[in-house]
Image (cartoon, rainbow, N blue to C red):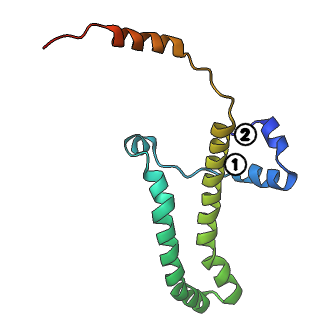
Amino acid sequence: MLSREELEQIPVHYRLLVKLLLKLPNPEFPHFILKKLPEIEGVFWALVVPILLTLYFFFSVWLFAFLTWIIGFPLNIVIGFLVPAVIFVFFLRTQLERAILFWRSVHEQPKEWETSKRVEKLMEIFNRPKRKK
């Protein structure tokens, strides 16, 4: 995803985080779903995940109580916060990939456009005699 030169330009403490996040698997939708509905991934991260995390937050009260009854105090908090932490790490991975792609698209070298051929075709179209119906 990042070249060695691009990675060396990042500060050291961010470089380690970027390397770690880019080694994680990227949770993606299958290609055949994204081909038909390309917006589904954005909807998933913008609507579905926050709603599920909110529901998890409200139901975690019962989860913590149940885990305290079964497991005990310090371990129940670790297990209870494991689900949001894993989702947050995958969210960071996805956001990092999107930020890298956005940065490349904005700061990429401008492309040379061959406009002379297109202008000639348009001039031919405009100079053609109009047909009468």
Instruction: Give the residue type at disc 1.
Output: Leu
- Within the image, what quadrant is residue 66 found in? bottom right
| Residue 121 image offset from top left, x and y in percent | 41, 11
Mark 2 crowdedness (10 Å alpha carbons): few <14, some 14-19, many ≥20:
some
Q: Quick check: 103 left or right of 45?
A: right
Q: Quick check: 87 left or right of 13?
A: left
Q: Which mark is residue 22?
A: 1
State the quadrant of the N terminus: top right
State the quadrant of the C terminus: top left
| Of the pair 125 and 85, the residue shown nearer to us | 125
Mark 1 crowdedness (10 Å alpha carbons): few <14, some 14-19, many ≥20:
some
Residue drawn at x 57%, y 20% as measured from the top left: 113
Q: Quick check: 12 left or right of 47?
A: right
For label 2, the residue is 2
Pick out the residue farthest to the left.
133
| Residue 73 image offset from top left, x and y in percent | 68, 89
Pick out the residue farthest to the right.
12
Q: Do the CB atoms of the residues marked 1 and 2 lie less than 8 Å apart?
A: yes
| Residue 116 image offset from top left, x and y in percent | 52, 12
Helix or strand or loop: what does disc 2 sit on?
loop
